[in-house]
Amino acid sequence: MAVGVGSIAPDFELSDQHGTPVTLSGLRGRKVVLIFYPLAFSNVCHGELNALRDEFVTTVPADVQPLTVSVDSVFSHRAWADQEGYTFPLLSDFWPHGQVARAYGVLDETRGLAVRGTFVIDGEGVVRWKIVNPISAARDPADYLQALAEIS
């Protein structure tokens, strides 16, 4: 079932590219931009995460935490982050495979990977904005900034 605007975001614990566990509930009090993407090293994902690095992370207030999630392993995320200079968390939804993407309603069960879903979550854990794009359609980080401005 898809998570809707106004609902409580499902909590999770996933490891980042350094193997450090990250929980959504551990970020209470901060806004979270939760960004699901299909696969590391793929063309559209590369463009999206580069835009996140170059246009979003450098402009968001300190109380905003971007989190990216894919079904790739921690090891793939580490190699990609090191190669591209990604300093934000790349979370691994590898095992149980796609469990968090499924909880948010963005797992493509046939392909076994997430579609491009983004959820802006307020400091109380409530989803305030979301967009879900097909795998082939990139998102614009300017939309995340606008959504954050509207909930501030």
Image (spheres, grey):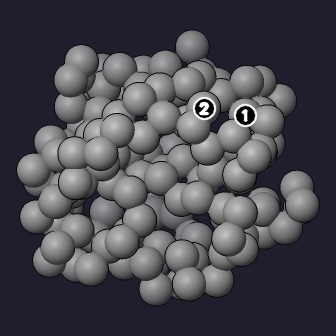
Q: Residue at x 53, y 59 (%)?
A: 66
Q: Residue at x 15, y 42 (%)?
A: 73
Where residue 126 sits: x, y (%)?
77, 33
Q: Residues within 10 Å of mark 2 (few under 14, many from 20)?
A: some
Q: Quadrant of residue 136?
A: bottom left
| Distance CA(mark 1)–CA(mark 2) | 7 Å
Where residue 128 sits: x, y (%)?
79, 42
Instruction: Report if the CB atoms under discs 1 and 2 are less than 8 Å apart.
Output: yes
Q: Quadrant of residue 65?
A: bottom right
Q: Quadrant of residue 56?
A: bottom right
Q: In terms of sequence position, does the residue under pointer 1 or pointer 2 come before the other? A: 2
Q: Identity of the amino acid at label 1?
A: Gly
State which mark lies toward you, 1 or 2.
Answer: 2
Image quadrant where one finds the C terminus: bottom right
Q: Is residue 120 above or below residue 24?
A: below
Q: Residue at x 48, y 35 (%)?
A: 23
**Left or right of 100, for residue 118:** right
**Left or right of 23, for residue 81:** left
Where residue 2 sits: x, y (%)?
59, 22
Q: Would residue 143 be visible to someone looking at this image?
A: no
Where residue 118 sits: x, y (%)?
56, 48
Q: Residue at x 27, y 80 (%)?
A: 85
Q: Which mark is residue 25?
A: 2
Q: Which mark is residue 12?
A: none
Judged from the image, the secondary structure of the residue bearing numbered disc 1 is loop
**Left or right of 67, for residue 27:** right
**Left or right of 132, for residue 145:** right
Q: Residues within 10 Å of mark 1 (few under 14, many from 20)?
A: many
Q: Would residue 40 be visible to someone looking at this image?
A: yes
Q: Is residue 73 above or below residue 54?
A: above
Q: Identity of the amino acid at label 2?
A: Ser
Q: Which residue is mark 1?
A: 125
